[in-house]
Amino acid sequence: MRDAQHLPAILAFLAQVGIAIREEPIAPDTFLPGIAIRDGALVFDSARLQWPGDLLHEAGHIAVLPPAVRPQAGDDLQLGAEIPFAGEMEALAWAYAAATAIGLPVEVLVHEGGYKGQSKALLQMYALGIYPGLQGLCGAQMAESPNFMPECGPVHYPRMLKWLRD
């Protein structure tokens, strides 16, 4: 596992914000090595996990779901596609905010082994202050940004108003 030293901080953060997470063996054919979503919980297999930062992204998919459907979340992530502000981009923005809150180097989240070969482009966007999915987090009232909300309070993204969607 690469970046293994960051795993304890990631696990502690996820537990602190209320993302159900557990460790157990996982079959080798998961979408991301060593990670699954089952019944709204994040499951990981430390023997198969390659990139601990991927836990944050997958947790983001759970976090942006409304509480009524969160327990139904699974690996197919079809629920998010049907719900406004609960898709891939919002999960990405949530994960970036989580990495920032933990104090992780952004490269732990956006690593060369992920994001369909677009890691460098994504890192460049973050460096320029462009945050894909931020507008959706604002729409879900999980974050605020003067770019999308003319009258927002003092807590601006990447700090979050709340880590789990109401």
Image (tube, grey):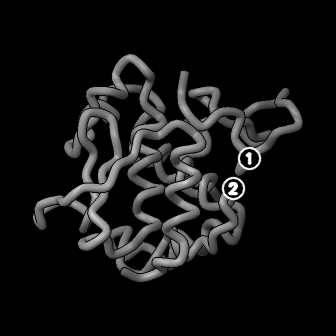
Left or right: 145, with 121 as reference point: right
Question: Mark 1 and mark 2: span between their CA atoms?
Answer: 7 Å
Label 2 sits on a secondary structure element that is: helix
Quadrant holding the C terminus: top right
Left or right: 18, with 78 as reference point: right
Mark 1 crowd level (few <14, some 14–19, many ≥20, 10 Å Cα): some
**Which numbered circle lies on residue 159?**
1
Q: Which residue type carries mark 2?
A: Ala
Mark 2 crowd level (few <14, some 14–19, many ≥20, 10 Å Cα): few
Q: Nearer the viewer, residue 70 or 7?
A: 7
Seen as rendered, the residue at the extreme right is 154
* Residue 46 picture location, percent across and down: 31, 68
Q: Earlier in the sequence, mark 1 or mark 2?
A: 2
Q: Which residue is mark 2?
A: 101
Residue sitting at x 84%, y 27%? 151
* Residue 26 picture location, percent across and down: 17, 59
Left or right: 54, with 14 as reference point: left
* Residue 112 picture location, percent across and down: 42, 81
Q: Could you tell me if the residues under marks 1 and 2 are in contact, i.e. CB atoms within 8 Å?
A: yes
Residue sitting at x 52%, y 74%? 108
Q: Nearer the viewer, mark 1 or mark 2?
A: 2
Q: Which residue type carries mark 1?
A: Arg
Residue 159 sits above or below residue 108 on the image? above
The image quarter in which residue 48 lies: bottom left
Residue sitting at x 71%, y 51%? 158
Residue sitting at x 69%, y 41%? 160
Residue 99 sits above or below residue 18 on the image? below
The image quarter in which residue 136 lies: top right
Quadrant holding the N terminus: bottom left
